[in-house]
């Protein structure tokens, strides 16, 4: 049994981690930290966890957590994970950070977009970007993994086969993405109130969303050249889910059947990525509560473009499920442990 702890356990991603890890046969959760709910049982904060964890939340220092665990999941707002991760590595504790602090190979990119000092560029350069379908080999050997953002996960999985094979012009990529309200976190905000979200959809972070450089970093590595994208996220009046629809001009003529084969070859053997049959476009509901990613594509012969749609659950494959997938790889467990399940339907 691997002793694991979660720093920041009572946010949505922390709670999702507890939900998944509570049924992991190789994990013993020994520390759940929370300042707001210190002393309360996790099942009192999230009653859905009743019967699955009796562990109380505690206002523990990072040092106290690291004394108890072999692996630590950090689910803190940006700007807070770096010192915790650095200390964990000093103590031989493996790290999976669900925030943005370690996702960028260049700390200056993080500082430019997140407007806070990084403090440890060497640690950022050492961290492995935790998208298993792209970086599985490196994740297996990693001591610190930077879990990807939810939007980047859906976008990168959707475009990776085409960029890697050179089928699209990287300068023409447009991304229209939509997320459920849980992507904004559990903190009370006016924009997350029911009466603000219900029967409404709106763009936000236009021409400046913080996930843009993360997307560009990974797409550039796949393409072997600098990639800049137009990325616009939107808020949907749903609890969970991300749907990203991506458009790009074909770099050379290709049939839809040819491109479908590219995807089938690229994701052959992947346990969580599914190319849907022609005409069956991804729905967020189909991946709800699962670690799965559903993808489909079409070639628009009239415009010479390809259209790709990708759906994930923002809290599972977009956050905590992917974190557990990375944990399994780092610890040598079957990758699907505690994760192999279809989405909830209806």
Image: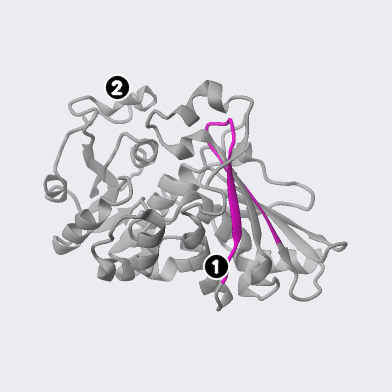
Q: Secondary structure at mark 1?
A: helix
Q: Quadrant of residue 111?
A: bottom left
Residue 322 rendering spot, x and y as whole percentages:
44, 51
- When the figure is inspected, residue 314 is found, relative to residue 250, above or below; the finding is above
Question: Label for residue 219?
Answer: 1
Q: Quadrant of the C terminus?
A: top right
Find the magenta span and give its range. 227-247
Q: Quadrant of residue 24?
A: top left
For residue 135: magenta? no
Question: Label for residue 240?
Answer: none
Viewer-nearest residue: 272 or 34: 34
Q: Is residue 171 left or right of residue 115?
A: right
- When the figure is inspected, residue 279 is found, relative to residue 345, above or below; the finding is below
Q: Which residue of the protein is positioned furthest toward the right in this rendering?
A: 302
Residue 316 in view (yes/no): yes
Residue 119 rendering spot, x and y as whole percentages:
23, 62
Query: Residue at the location (60% across, 50% down)?
Result: 232
Q: Which residue of the protein is positioned furthest toward the bottom in this rendering?
A: 224
Q: Quadrant of residue 20?
A: top left
Q: Secondary structure at mark 2?
A: helix
For residue 246: magenta? yes
The residue wearing badge 2 is 44
Estimate how packed mark 2 is, as few (under 14), some (14 to 19) or many (20 or more) residues with alpha carbons within 10 Å: some
- When the figure is inspected, residue 8 is found, relative to residue 324, above or below; the finding is above
Residue 103 in view (yes/no): no
Q: Is residue 302 left or right of residue 94?
A: right
Q: Is residue 8 left or right of residue 315?
A: left
Query: Residue at the location (52% across, 22% down)?
Result: 194
Residue 35 rendering spot, x and y as whole percentages:
21, 33
């Amino acid at each position: 049994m691997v002793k694991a702890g979660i720093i920041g356990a009572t946010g949505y991603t922390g709670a999702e981690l507890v939900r998944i890890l509570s049924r992991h046969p190789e994990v013993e959760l020994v520390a759940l930290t929370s300042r707001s709910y210190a002393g309360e049982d996790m099942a009192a904060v999230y009653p859905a966890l009743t019967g699955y964890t009796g562990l109380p939340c505690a206002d523990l220092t990072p040092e106290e957590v690291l004394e108890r665990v072999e692996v630590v999941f950090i689910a803190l707002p940006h700007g807070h994970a770096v010192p915790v991760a650095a200390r964990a590595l000093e103590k031989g504790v493996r790290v999976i950070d669900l925030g943005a602090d370690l996702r960028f190979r260049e700390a200056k990119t993080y500082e430019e977009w997140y407007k806070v000092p990084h403090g440890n560029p060497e640690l950022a350069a050492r961290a492995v970007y935790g998208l298993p379908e792209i970086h599985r080999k490196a994740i297996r050997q990693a001591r610190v993994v930077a879990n990807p953002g939810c939007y980047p996960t859906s976008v990168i999985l959707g475009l990776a086969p085409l960029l890697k094979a050179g089928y699209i012009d990287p300068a023409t990529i447009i991304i229209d993405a939509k997320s459920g309200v849980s992507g904004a976190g559990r903190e009370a905000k006016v924009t997350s109130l029911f009466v603000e979200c219900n029967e409404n959809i709106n763009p936000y972070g236009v021409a400046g969303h913080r996930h843009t450089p993360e997307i560009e970093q990974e797409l550039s590595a796949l393409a072997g050249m600098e990639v800049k994208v137009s990325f616009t996220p939107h808020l949907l009046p749903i609890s969970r889910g991300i749907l990203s629809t991506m458009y790009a001009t074909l770099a050379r003529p290709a049939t839809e059947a040819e491109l479908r084969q590219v995807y089938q070859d690229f994701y052959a053997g992947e346990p969580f990525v599914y190319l849907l049959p022609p005409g069956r476009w991804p729905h967020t509901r189909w991946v709800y509560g699962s670690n799965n990613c559903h993808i489909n594509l079409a070639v628009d012969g009239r415009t010479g473009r390809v259209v790709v749609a990708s759906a994930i659950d923002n809290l599972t494959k977009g956050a905590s499920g992917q974190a557990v997938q990375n944990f399994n790889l780092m610890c040598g467990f079957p990758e699907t442990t505690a994760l192999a399940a279809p989405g909830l339907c209806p």
